[in-house]
Image: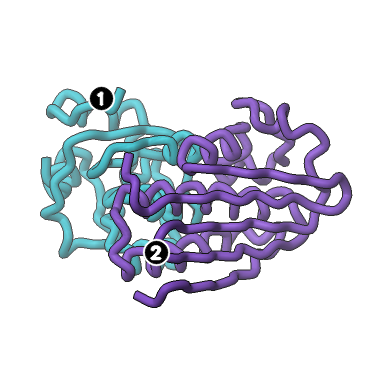
């Protein structure tokens, strides 16, 4: 494969029908690159949780994918209300999701913690009334 | 247990993936909360749910789940079938409750995850 590949996908806030489209495209790319299936699953589950978070909470967002021979780096950046207390948002069960989000089968306060469990590294920064940026890194060469 | 045997046992209708009804399932998980489904690490899981929307199919796709049973007589939309078809899923519609569906499968030897 090429030394480095980069892709980006736009995500619309509130568009539940399309939620998961970007993660699905990323899954196809990773499978085509013959990435280990366990790593593919952890990557797409974490990305999908992040994509659903953008749809559920933000106005719009972009998912940046950067793959090289060592690692997969996925950056989910949104314009939205931001997270006032990241430690609280990382607690399992804490959620500010709307009833619409819950009707879709999410909003139980498990998204960010599950992203962290699946990712090798996760970094989260947020500014209230501006937006949130979550970066996940998956290492390709030291399988767990 | 093969999906076609599951369909027979549950008197369920295969609405997508008839040609893949030879898939074999070892374990099953029942949930309407997709966040819980996304925490599973197992492969070849059968998902039993009463939540019928696009995100149910997306969740199955991301979790490498190959077969979904929609219980409580929930109907699958053409859009969901298209997405399921793209991902080689088998989708069943069943009129039984989640409880009865799980009971019949458990009795027939399908294992729980936890």
Furthest-right residue in this view: A129
Residue A134 at x, y percent in the picture: 65, 49
Judged by depth in the image, the label closer to the viewer, 1 or 2, is: 2
Residue A116 at x, y percent in the picture: 54, 38
Query: Chain B in the picture: what colour?
Result: cyan
Disc 1 with disc 2 on a shared chain: no
Spot the purple chain and give its letter: A
Give the numbered dot on residue B103. Answer: 1
Q: Is residue A97 visible?
A: yes
Which quarter of the rendered picture does the C terminus of chain B lie within? top left
User: Relative to residue A139, is residue B16 drawn left or right?
Assistant: left
Q: In this view, does A85 lie above or below A105?
A: above
Residue at horizontal 37%, vertical 40%? B71
Residue A17 at x, y percent in the picture: 58, 61
Callout 2: residue from which chain? Answer: A
Q: Nearer the viewer, residue B24 or A50?
A: A50
Residue at horizontal 42%, vertical 38%? B37
Residue at horizontal 70%, vertical 52%? A133
The number of discs equals: 2
Q: Is residue B93 visible?
A: no
Pointer 1 with pointer 2, Cβ within 8 A: no
Label 1: how many Cα within 10 Å (few below 14, some 14–19, many 20+) = few
Cα distance between the residues tagged 1 and 2:
47 Å
User: Relative to residue B55, is residue B42 drawn left or right?
Assistant: left
Residue A84 at x, y percent in the picture: 83, 36
Q: Which of A105 and A124 is in front in this view?
A: A124
Q: Which of B112 and A28 is in front in this view?
A: A28
Furthest-bottom residue in this view: A2
Label 2: how many Cα within 10 Å (few below 14, some 14–19, many 20+) = few
- As helix, strand or loop, the secondary structure at mark 2 comes to loop
Q: Would you name the residue on which mark 2 appears?
A: A69
């Amino acid at each position: 494969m090429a030394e480095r590949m980069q892709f980006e996908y736009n995500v619309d806030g509130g568009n539940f029908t399309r939620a998961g489209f970007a993660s699905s495209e990323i899954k196809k790319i990773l499978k085509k690159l013959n990435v280990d299936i366990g790593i593919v699953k952890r990557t797409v589950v974490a990305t999908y949780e992040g994509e659903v978070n953008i749809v559920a909470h933000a106005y719009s967002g972009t998912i940046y994918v950067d793959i090289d021979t060592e690692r997969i780096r996925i950056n989910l950046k949104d314009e939205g209300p931001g997270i006032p207390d990241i430690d609280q948002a990382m607690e399992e069960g804490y959620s500010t999701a709307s009833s619409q989000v819950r009707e879709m089968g999410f909003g139980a306060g498990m998204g960010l913690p599950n992203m962290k469990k699946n990712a090798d590294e996760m970094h989260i920064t947020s500014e209230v009334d501006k937006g949130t940026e979550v970066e996940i890194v998956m290492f390709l060469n030291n399988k767990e | 247990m093969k999906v076609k045997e599951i369909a027979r046992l549950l008197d369920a209708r295969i609405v997508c993936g008839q040609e893949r009804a030879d898939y074999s399932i070892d374990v099953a998980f029942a949930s309407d909360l997709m966040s819980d489904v996304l925490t599973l690490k197992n492969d070849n899981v059968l998902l039993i749910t009463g939540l019928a929307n696009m995100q149910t199919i997306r969740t199955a796709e991301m979790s490498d789940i190959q077969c979904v049973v929609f219980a409580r007589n929930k109907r699958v939309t053409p859009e969901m079938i298209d997405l399921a078809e793209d991902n080689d899923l088998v989708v069943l519609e069943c009129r039984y409750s989640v409880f009865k569906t799980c009971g019949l499968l458990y009795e027939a030897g399908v294992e729980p995850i936890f």
